[in-house]
Image (spheres, rainbow, N blue to C red):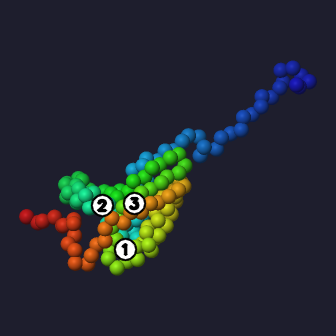
Amino acid sequence: MSEHPGTETPAKEPQVAPAERGRTTIADGVVEKIAGMAARDVLGVHAMGGGLARTFGAVRDRVPGGGKSVSRGVRAEVGEVQTALDLEIVVDYGVAIADVARAVRENVIAAVERMTGLEVVEVNIAVSDVKLPDEEEEEPSPRIQ
């Protein structure tokens, strides 16, 4: 207590930094898009998603306003500070699958962690197909009428 009654200075509460005043949440779809773009950037990745997902995606891509789905073949589970990802990819024939998977994992982790600040705890990769040189594309270009 102070010698003079009524002249006590109230204890100042510490200021909270502006960056800590509120909460940021990141939707699963945001992480899926980032991961999808990062995975497609890796040499040897021909496509994302399994056969059925690619078929439906090809149809959706041709619908006006449908646009390409960059998150096709990617599933994310996002928590408050961590995320886990499952990717399904198609690789080009002749590539070393283990090397492509390692490069995809590294690229996805770097992109997601840099852009979101989330810790990527795992990236599971399922190689669902290999694109042979003489195979026709499953996603044919639109016909000109």
Against 1, residue 109 (above or below) is below
Q: How packed is label 1: few (under 14 Cα within 10 Å), some, or many (20 or more)?
A: many
Relative to 11, 72 lies left or right = left
Relative to 145, 56 lies left or right = right
Q: How packed is label 2: few (under 14 Cα within 10 Å), some, or many (20 or more)?
A: some
Q: Which label is found at residue 50?
A: 2
The image position of residue 117, as x and y in percent, is 54, 54
Q: Which label is found at residue 87?
A: 3
In the picture of the structure, the residue carrying the numbered disc 1 is: 44
Q: How packed is label 3: few (under 14 Cα within 10 Å), some, or many (20 or more)?
A: many
Of the residues under marks 3 and 2, which one precedes in the sequence? 2
Q: Nearer the viewer, residue 87 or 126?
A: 126
Q: Residue at x 71, y 38 (%)?
A: 14
Q: Quadrant of the N terminus?
A: top right
User: Dot 2: what SS?
Assistant: loop
The image position of residue 46, as x and y in percent, is 32, 70
Q: Quadrant of the C terminus?
A: bottom left
Q: Residue at x 48, y 54 (%)?
A: 84
Question: Which quadrant of the structure image shows residue 86?
Answer: bottom left
User: Dot 3: what SS?
Assistant: strand
Q: Residue furthest left?
A: 145
Relative to 49, 139 lies left or right = left
Q: Residue at x 49, y 62 (%)?
A: 109
User: Dot 1: what SS?
Assistant: loop
Q: Can you see residue 96?
A: yes
Q: Nearer the viewer, residue 29 or 132?
A: 132
* Disc 3 from disc 2: Cα separation: 10 Å
- Identify the amino acid type marked 2: Gly
The image position of residue 30, as x and y in percent, is 41, 52
